[in-house]
Every structure is written in structure tokens, then in C-alpha cells.
Image: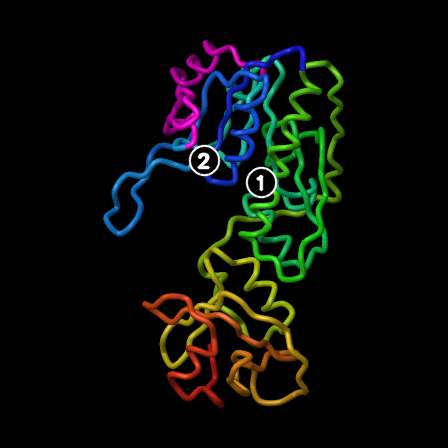
Amino acid sequence: MSNQLAVAFAGTPAFALPALEAIATSSNRIVAVYTQPDRPAGRGRKLAASPVRQRAAVLGLPVEQPATLGDPAVQARLAALAPDVLVVVAYGLLLPPAILATPRLGCLNIHASLLPRWRGAAPVQRAIEAGDSTTGISIMRMEAGLDTGPVMLTEATPIGARETAGELLERLAAAGGRLILAALDALADGTARFLAQDPALATLAPRLRKAEARIDWRLPAVAIERQVRAFNPWPVADTRCGGQQLRIWQARVAPAAAGPAPGTILASGRDGILVMTGEEALVVERVQPEGRRPMNAPEFARARPLDGLVLG
């Protein structure tokens, strides 16, 4: 690319790292990396830097960690950096109008869905939960609304039949890193084109809540299996087993005729724990008992009698 852009980057989790690294190693120039302030983490609750801050340090990039972008001093600092464009990837802070208006070429967001489907904080998880066969990455120009801006580029990908949210997020993060370079090239040479979203096609992807993790065994097995994949690695689908929490990390659908009440364990053995649902059965393959490490379901089943027990 002949025209180098001055890029401000804003991101916080590991999902943002491929885009940060791609831009940092391109002919573009990163003038600042914005990431959320260090937060208490782990059992000791010591302050921990975000993945983006840690990677920016390795790359030798200047870091800004404002608690809010609504502070006039923070806004003046960004204006002084004179970025051509602000690239935002899972930053986690609201961008007020003054920030959106600062970069000469606007603000681009890497969003993990094919907009306008799944606007919001959890597009990958909601796509898996809904049983979507395809998702992707969108590069959009940011505006005041939630993921409502016009779309510049997209890249679609199938969702694997057994793919978890964590696995899909990793693939989409890599795709975002590739696609943002094409977007910056188009901005620099004046060939960028934006397509307005059709609001009639919009669906929302609200942030996951821990309360959603509890399995309702009255649902069809296919819906529960999607829930297990969508909530892996967080917050992890769970149930009650013998009065204690049992997290379910991996499961698959199995055919079963109508039988005992949903949640009843039909059998347990080398293949896992077979549980009746509202429609068909679910083979639980990997679990995590309360206070213990994750383990294969047969290992858990060997330690206690399970057949006939009702989960929930």
C-alpha cells in the first residue's frame, strides 16, 4: 500500500490480538493502543493487564488506558494523535460522538457476525445457540447505534457441527485480522464502499448471563447440545446432580424413544452419560463436578451410581 495510515487501535480481549498484530506488522502506523484499565483477576485478585495491553508492550506500542472515553481530556488526547482511522475490536467501552468524529476517515469495527444478524455483545454464542449453519466477520463503520453502521467488508464461514464458541471465536479473530488489512487498504486508496444495513433483517445478541447456563432438560436434546457449545468456555452449561453443581463441557445428541422424565439418567458407561430430554436424549461426554477439574464423563460415572438419577 502506498498510502500509510495513522491508526489508533482499541481492543481488550484475546479476540482483538490478530487484528492488532496484523496492523502492527503492516505498512500502517499505530499511533496508540487503547485498552481497558488493568482489572483484579485470579484468586489473589491482583491487578492484571488485558491481553491487548500485554501484546502492545511486546510490540513496543504506546498504550492508553482511560476508564472512560467521555472525559474531555481523553478526547483531546486522541485528537492530538491525529489518527486517520480508529479500529475497534471488542474494546468494551462506549465511544461517544466526540470520539467517533475524531478520526479523519472514521471508526471501523470488527464484528463477529454477518451484520445485520446478531448485533450486540455475544454474536458468536447466539449464532451457535440458534443453530445457525453460517456466520462470519463484518467490517463496519461505527455510528451512534449498536452495530448499526454501514458494512464495508464481510467474510463468511460455516459453523462446525461440534464447534464451540471458543473455537469459533479463535477462527473469526484470525479472519478479522486478515480482513481489516483489506479494509485499511481500501480506505487509503479511496476505493472503500459501504452498504447500509437492512434493519428489517437485524437480530440482537445480548451479553451472556450466568443464569442462562442452567440446563432445562425439558428442551429438545438438539437445543441443549447447542447451549453446551455456545456456553463453552463461558459461563459453561450446568445442571444439578445429587445436590451439587455439575458443569457440562461437551455433549452430543442421541436418538431415544419417549421414556422417563426429562433429566433422568438412562445409562452411564464408556460412551458417556445418557440423559433423557424433552425430545431425544443427550450423551454427556465431558463434565466438571463442583470444586473439581473437568473430566471425561465415564471417569465421573465410575465413582458413583448414576442410572435413574434425575438431573436438574
Looking at the rendered image, the quarter that the N terminus falls into is top right
Residue 125 vertical position relative to residue 74 in the rendered view, above or below = below
Is 65 included in the stretch rendered in magenta? yes
- Horizontal and vertical percent for residue 284? 53, 74
Look at label 2 and name its amino acid.
Answer: Thr
Left or right position of 140 against 65: right
Q: Which residues are magenta?
A: 55-84
Name the outermost residue toward the left: 44
Residue 292 vertical position relative to residue 81 in the rendered view, above or below = below
| Disc with the residue nearer the chain's start (1 vs 2) | 2
- Residue at image x 71%, y 39%? 155
Left or right position of 203 against 22: right
Q: At numbered mark 1, what does the secondary structure look like: helix, strand or loop?
A: helix
Q: At numbered mark 2, what does the secondary structure look like: helix, strand or loop?
A: loop
Label 1 – label 2 distance at C-alpha = 13 Å
Question: CB atoms at circles 1 and 2 under 8 Å apart?
Answer: no
Q: Which residue is mark 1?
A: 173
Residue 175, picture quadrant: top right
- Horizontal and vertical percent for residue 280? 65, 79
Residue 112 vertical position relative to residue 85 in the rendered view, above or below = below
Frontmost of labels 1 and 2 is 1
Look at label 1 and name its amino acid.
Answer: Ala
- Residue at image x 72%, y 39%? 199
Q: Please tell me the numbered disc located at residue 12.
A: 2
Is 49 included in the stretch rendered in magenta? no
- Residue at image x 34%, y 68%? 292
- Horizontal and vertical percent for residue 160? 67, 57
